[in-house]
Amino acid sequence: MAEAPQPVPPAKHALRETMRERLAAMTKTERREASSLACARLINLDEFKHASVVMLYMPLAAEVDTTAIAIRTFQTGKTICVPRVDWERRNMVAVEVSSFDDHYMETDEHGVRTPAGGRQLVPTSIDLIVVPALAFDTHGNRLGRGGGFYDRFLSRLRRTAKTVGLGYDIQIVDQVPADERDVQVGIVVTDRRVSHSRSSRV
């Protein structure tokens, strides 16, 4: 049975609105250039270089484009997986992909690209997961879009797995409002910085 949606605290709602406005104000050129810089910083992380199984999100229009990371992942022989979301059950699984071509991918009812087929991987097999959000702080807190999909998925990873939040620097705030259901990431990467936190997923 799907979990009942939780009431959204006013602080989270206000920050989501602010971030949506900031992201909407970016030009295509700004997004492209910032995405390139952010992806280059992530690719240079030791945590990425040492990972064998990498999970990437499929970006929405306003999010950092992960294509450059995907290309490097394929080039270096790593296993790559992406999310498949069951919106009715509010659940997300990792599915291995060998290409992002339209032959292998489709667009779901929420406009998110998702694997048309592929082998499902258990969360404990993932070495590094790249996570989107509307806002991050440098302590590893993240504000998602309200579904809780990544919070639930991150809680199923093994403790040694590396979690990386990827975003634009304009998405960094002093403090993201968080509660006991919110799961931090260990590293936050933007076009201007890399921030390591002391987060715990427990």
Image (spheres, rainbow, N blue to C red):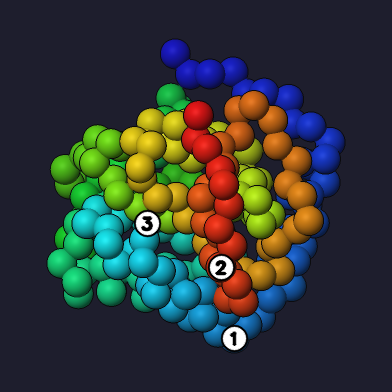
Q: Residue at x 38, y 37 (%)?
A: 159
Task: Describe residue 179's horizontal placement relative to residue 56 as left or right.
Answer: right
The x and y percentages for residue 122 are 24, 35
Q: Earlier in the sequence, mark 3 or mark 1?
A: 1
Q: Residues within 10 Å of mark 1 (few under 14, many from 20)?
A: few
Residue at position x 47%, y 55% from top? 164
Task: Name the element at disc 1.
Answer: helix
Instruction: Report if residue 91 is visible in the image.
Output: yes
Q: Position of residue 196 (x, y in %)?
A: 55, 58
Q: Which label sits in the foreground, 1 or 2?
A: 2
Kind of residue at badge 3: Leu
Q: Residue furthest front?
A: 198
Alpha carbon separation for disc pair 1 and 2: 22 Å
Residue 194: mark: 2
Q: Nearer the viewer, mark 3 or mark 2?
A: 2
- Numbered label attached to residue 29: 1
Looking at the picture, how far across and down is residue 59, in whole percent? 47, 61
Q: Viewed as shown, does residue 191 lie left or right of 25?
A: left
| Label 3 SS | loop
Q: Amino acid at mark 2?
A: Val
The residue at the point 69 percent across, 30 percent down is 179
Query: Is residue 115 shown to the viewer in this render?
Result: no
Q: Position of residue 170 (x, y in %)?
A: 71, 69
